[in-house]
Amino acid sequence: MIKYLFMLVISSVVCEDAIRPNFLIILTDDQDSTLGGMNPMKNVQRFIGDKGVTFKNAYVTSPICCPSRASFLTGLYVHNHLTVNNSLSGGCYSRIWKNIESRTFATTLSDAGYKTFYAGKYLNEYGVKAAGGPEQIPPGWSEWHGLVGNSVYYNYTISNNGVPTHSTDLYLTDIIRDLSISYIENQTGSEPFLMVLAPPAPHQPFTPAPRHKGVFANVTAHRAPNFNIAVKDRHWLLSMPPSPLPDNMLSELDRVYRSRWEALLSVDELVSDVIEALDTNSLLEHTYVIYTSDNGYHMGQYSQMYDKRQPYESDIKVPLIIKGPGIEENTTSDLPVINIDLAPTIISLAGLQPSRIMDGRPIELIGNKTKTERTMLVEYYGEAKDGTVDPDCPWSYDKDNLAQCYPEYACKCQDARNNTFGCLRHIAKRINMKYCLFADNQSFTEMYDLFTDPYELTNIAQQVLPSVRHWYKLTLARMLACRGSDHCDHPLETPRIVF
Ligand SMILES: *[C@@H]1O[C@H](CO)[C@@H](O)[C@H](O)[C@H]1NC(C)=O
Ligand SMILES: *[C@@H]1O[C@H](CO)[C@@H](O)[C@H](O)[C@H]1NC(C)=O
Ligand SMILES: *[C@@H]1O[C@H](CO)[C@@H](O)[C@H](O)[C@H]1NC(C)=O
Ligand SMILES: *[C@@H]1O[C@H](CO)[C@@H](O)[C@H](O)[C@H]1NC(C)=O
Ligand SMILES: *[C@@H]1O[C@H](CO)[C@@H](O)[C@H](O)[C@H]1NC(C)=O
Ligand SMILES: *[C@@H]1O[C@H](CO)[C@@H](O)[C@H](O)[C@H]1NC(C)=O
Ligand SMILES: *[C@@H]1O[C@H](CO)[C@@H](O)[C@H](O)[C@H]1NC(C)=O
Ligand SMILES: *[C@@H]1O[C@H](CO)[C@@H](O)[C@H](O)[C@H]1NC(C)=O
């Protein structure tokens, strides 16, 4: 009898193994979805979009790399993983993070017998000396090729399974592609695998591969109705002069825009080459492919130069496309989703349970959709950085509270301590609202009705009924303290929106 039971257990494990899916996740750096950031991705469209579901309402917990990536890995909101900015002092690959790092989707899958592979940018401070150096291999990864530090295209160090390897002249996106293909060719299909590919594009300095330079020479920055408009009724940082930007800044925006597209072409090639390798090795059929970005980007919106760190759709909305077994081909979805949903989604598709509580929840990929209403939280903690406030800028006296102010960009700062905000992105059948409260000394509030005002041109915070504003304020406070998907999903009952 005991022997019989034992055999049953073994056979059920073997059987599970046979159907456990693989995962291929491509995580780009700063790729927008609202300004045409996906336009150059013809292979992504062909091999993932046409074969799967494209999410039209995909958001991130924070419009900046390290906090957003920490959310992606853990399924936790920023106030729960405590990586608040890109510095070690702000939790990025800090000691606090290392306690949380053992509860990512990678550790859950790895503990259940998955082989795991990571190549490219991880958390911005990974591998730097002060954060423990490149000999560390984050838990959960059996094949590790993490980039030391922040995204670059040349002259970088990769930790190859704990062995730092420097390269000056090999284009990083191509190296990630080559490692990925080699890894796929090594798979026998006997164990399921998880791969995360995190190329640097289209992050600053926006360097295309030589073969792609000039391909988009005639492309100019997307000029939507919110491009370079004079700002009124917005938080302090956005109100800084000049507004609108002088004409000579616009050609710089055009340069950045086309360089980003060109840098993305190597990612588009990577996607096609890696998917082809999966197909050639008969692994594609059982593989979920997820394509997304850590945050969006703005280029000229509301008279800003280029960056992220703002609460507008350009910065917080991201591409998200998923294909795989059982997912209907060539479809779009309006479901409100946020990057903390990816960890629980992957774990659930693998037939597993998260080892600890997560704030996100599995995305409904198959069958009828019920979770069409949601209030999602975006958190951002404004930075100040001495050394990035040029002494030639008139406000350099306040350099302890500002960041990235340069004369070549008309001294318009990109960040300030009080550019700290919590936002709610509330989507339901007849609701498409954004509410943001700034931690500055005016408690500045911005609200946009995305149904009637998709470009966020009119701040309606002072036009809505005080009771509506109050509901959002209260909900935001609750969301900022929420823990676990049940709690984070049901902050408060929905108000009736009356204007
Ligand atoms: C490469 O990076 C090193 C520091 O890691 C720096 O000293 C060197 O100047 C860089 N070389 C180039 C060509 O950028
Ligand atoms: C694939 O296997 C070869 C031979 O064992 C090994 O040299 C190579 O490093 C492996 N590739 C990856 C990415 O693991
Ligand atoms: C850009 O436009 C000019 C003039 O219309 C044309 O001559 C040139 O071939 C175009 N370049 C590219 C790369 O399309
Ligand atoms: C995908 O759907 C769109 C519209 O629903 C259609 O125009 C397009 O041809 C479809 N693409 C494929 C590859 O089936
Ligand atoms: C899905 O929705 C349709 C139409 O509302 C309904 O007929 C069907 O039973 C639903 N299927 C499931 C599995 O709930
Ligand atoms: C990052 O966050 C930490 C902790 O709040 C703070 O001390 C530090 O100044 C922040 N970094 C920047 C560049 O603002
Ligand atoms: C925001 O911070 C800047 C820089 O310290 C300061 O000049 C400004 O008065 C602050 N504004 C608000 C609304 O707190
Ligand atoms: C807002 O804060 C700034 C410094 O950050 C200070 O200069 C200003 O006086 C404050 N304004 C009010 C109304 O407290």
Image (tube, rainbow, N blue to C red):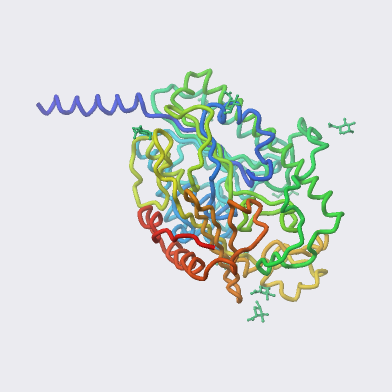
The count of marks equals: 0
Figure check: 77 above or below 352: below
* Residue 234 can be seen in this image: yes
Tell me residue 396's x, y (percent).
76, 72
Ligand 6's quadrant: bottom right
* Residue 128 can be seen in this image: no
Q: Residue at x 52, y 36 (%)?
A: 290
Q: Quadrant of the N terminus?
A: top left
Which of the pair 275/114 is nearer the observer? 275
Tell me residue 262's x, y (percent).
74, 37
Q: Residue at x 34, y 27 (%)?
A: 17
Q: Residue at x 50, y 27 (%)?
A: 329
Would you say 232 lies left or right of 85 here?
Answer: right
Furthest toward the left, the residue is 1
**Residue 165, image quadrant:** top right
**Residue 158, image quadrant:** top right
Would you say 48 lies left or right of 244 here?
Answer: left
Tell me residue 385's x, y (percent).
67, 66
Which of the pair 184/313 is nearer the observer? 313
Which of the pair 373/271 is nearer the observer? 373
Which of the pair 148/250 is nearer the observer? 250
Tell me residue 60's x, y (percent).
54, 50
Figure check: 43 above or below 255: above
Q: Quadrant of the C terminus?
A: bottom right
Furthest toward the front, the residue is 498
**Residue 159, image quadrant:** top right
